[in-house]
Image (cartoon, rainbow, N blue to C red):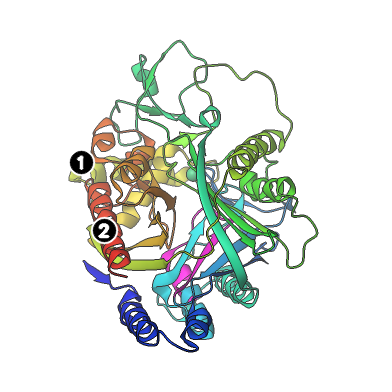
């Protein structure tokens, strides 16, 4: 574990010297000098189109399918903040999960073009299930080894940040939160019928992901939800909205036509919040952004009840986006804006052990592979999909280095985790964070599968299966402790300032 120190180290002496200098010159034109050197808070935002060509493979369901239509364009939504000393960028991409290598390529480009260090760039995927894949076989980190779409994506993210940077203007910033419990449901359930609990490893789990809706066989959910919508809003000194970044712990909504590319409810939120803030037809355009919180085990299905009615395609996601945007708008009315707040960021790499299949698992899947080879044209079974994944895992390294990051915006802390993170992990971070307000952006700076807690691993279920989750069962604990340590370090630097 190695934490890269934030650029505070450069800032503190400069600020102290400046203060000492202005105290020393308490006569004549010293006040003018103090006025001139007061740091100015600035913000800028831009969207970069990352829509893939038709024919690329949509991933998010059990089997990839080619994109045959673009329902709505995909974007990298970019926000750049600058406190006069430290610049940082947050970018949300309409994608199900983007590998670290692609984000790192984007960061290299951004750092080379703008000087903003990679540690201060938080790049994440929204987790729309109707975007095409940004994964691909990467043999080396040479740019030529990336797929066309990966290169395009990295380039467009970089362009978006550069354009947001070009829009920087003096700004005010505020943040708030409000609950919306009605659209989040834990999707892992204890059920009374063991036939619902069989796993592809030939065993029986204790909980079931996405059990039958409205069934009498449902007992209780296996975990909590986080109903909080957090948001950060920036506006010009005249009050013109520049951007609003929200965060809600909901997997996605769905309800798309097969073969359609769509940003899901994340895209609709971006539009609706702009409409509510009266930020239509602005120049530069307002940028709405919805990031994914900790929703690895949380979706939009109310399992207790039968579906009330049949929704048209894209109807439900608009309904949810409208509700989330309305709640944010409501809380936005009471928001206190600050003329200046300190910014800080820290990044570290954490080494985690990867899980390896047991000899019994290898045996089980060898039999499945042997009996399925003659029948390759039909749709593959769950067992066959996991047989292939387990085969690949056996070739994978025993350790993986994953990126962790924290951002401080005044007394708001943002943590970034490169996994589909469970709600209880996000709640724990909110609870234990030394910052007054905290939220987590998942699938940030990489994409390494699900991150169940050790307790959830013991219950089994889809998210815990090897091939869905890849790292040691204790990983969520190590990640939480590392992020809290980084938060404390940011705050100490803040206090010294
Ligand atoms: Zn998902």
Front residue of 376/312: it is 312
Q: Which residues are magenta?
A: 86-105
Q: Is residue 279 visible?
A: yes
Residue 421 on image: x %, y %: 38, 46
Q: Earlier in the sequence, mark 2 or mark 1?
A: 1
* Residue 87 among magenta residues: yes
Residue beneath disc 1: 360
Residue beneath disc 2: 488
In screen coordinates, is 182 left or right of 434? right
The C terminus appears in which quarter of the rendering? bottom left
Helix, strand or loop at mark 2: helix
Number of residues whose C-alpha sits closer than 10 Å to that of mark 2, classed few (under 14), some (14–19) or many (20 or more): some
In screen coordinates, is 215 left or right of 311? left
Q: Is residue 230 visible?
A: no
For the residues bearing labels 2 and 1, Cβ distance under 8 angstroms: no
Closer to the eye: label 2 or 1: 2
């Amino acid at each position: 574990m190695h934490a890269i120190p934030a650029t505070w180290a450069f800032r503190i002496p400069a600020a102290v010297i400046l203060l000492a200098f202005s105290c020393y010159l308490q006569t004549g034109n010293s006040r003018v000098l103090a006025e001139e050197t007061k740091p100015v808070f600035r913000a800028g935002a831009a969207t970069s189109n990352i829509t893939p060509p038709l024919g690329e493979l949509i991933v998010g369901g059990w089997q990839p399918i080619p994109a045959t239509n673009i329902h709505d364009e995909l974007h990298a939504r970019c926000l750049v903040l600058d406190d006069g000393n430290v610049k940082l960028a947050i970018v949300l991409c309409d994608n199900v999960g983007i590998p670290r290598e692609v984000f790192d390529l984007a960061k290299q480009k951004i750092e080379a073009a703008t000087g903003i260090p990679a540690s201060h760039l938080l790049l994440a995927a929204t987790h729309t299930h109707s975007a095409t894949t940004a994964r691909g076989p990467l043999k080396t980190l040479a740019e030529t080894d990336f797929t066309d779409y990966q290169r395009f994506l990295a380039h467009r993210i970089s362009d978006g940040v550069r354009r947001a940077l070009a829009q920087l203007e003096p700004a005010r910033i505020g943040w708030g939160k409000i609950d919306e419990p009605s659209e989040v449901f834990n999707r892992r359930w204890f059920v009374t019928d063991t036939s619902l609990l069989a796993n592809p490893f030939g065993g029986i789990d204790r909980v079931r992901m996405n059990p039958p809706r409205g069934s009498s066989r449902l007992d209780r959910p296996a975990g909590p939800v986080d109903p909080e919508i957090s948001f950060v809003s920036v506006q010009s000194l005249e009050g013109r909205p520049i951007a609003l970044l929200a965060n809600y712990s909901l997997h996605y909504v769905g309800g798309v036509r097969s073969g359609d590319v769509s940003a899901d409810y994340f895209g609709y939120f971006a539009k609706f919040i702009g409409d509510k803030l009266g930020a239509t037809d602005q120049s530069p355009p307002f940028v709405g952004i919805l990031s994914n919180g900790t929703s690895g085990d949380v979706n939009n299905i109310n399992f207790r009840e039968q579906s009330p009615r049949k929704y048209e395609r894209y109807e439900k996601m608009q309904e949810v986006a409208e509700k989330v945007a309305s709640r944010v708008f409501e809380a936005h009315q009471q928001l206190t804006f600050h003329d200046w707040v300190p910014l800080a960021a820290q990044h570290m790499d954490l080494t985690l052990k990867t899980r390896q299949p047991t000899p019994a698992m290898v045996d089980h899947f060898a039999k499945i592979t042997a009996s399925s080879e003659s029948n390759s044209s039909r749709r593959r079974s769950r067992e066959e999909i996991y047989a292939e994944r387990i085969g690949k895992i056996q070739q994978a390294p025993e350790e993986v280095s994953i990126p962790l990051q924290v951002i401080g915006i005044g007394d708001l802390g943002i943590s970034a985790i490169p996994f589909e993170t469970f709600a209880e992990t996000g709640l724990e971070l909110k609870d234990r964070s030394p910052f007054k307000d905290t939220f987590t952006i998942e699938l940030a700076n990489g994409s390494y599968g699900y991150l169940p807690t050790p307790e959830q691993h013991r219950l089994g279920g889809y998210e815990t299966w090897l091939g869905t989750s890849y790292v040691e069962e204790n990983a969520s604990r190590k990640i939480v402790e590392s992020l809290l340590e980084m938060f404390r370090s940011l705050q100490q630097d803040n206090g010294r300032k």
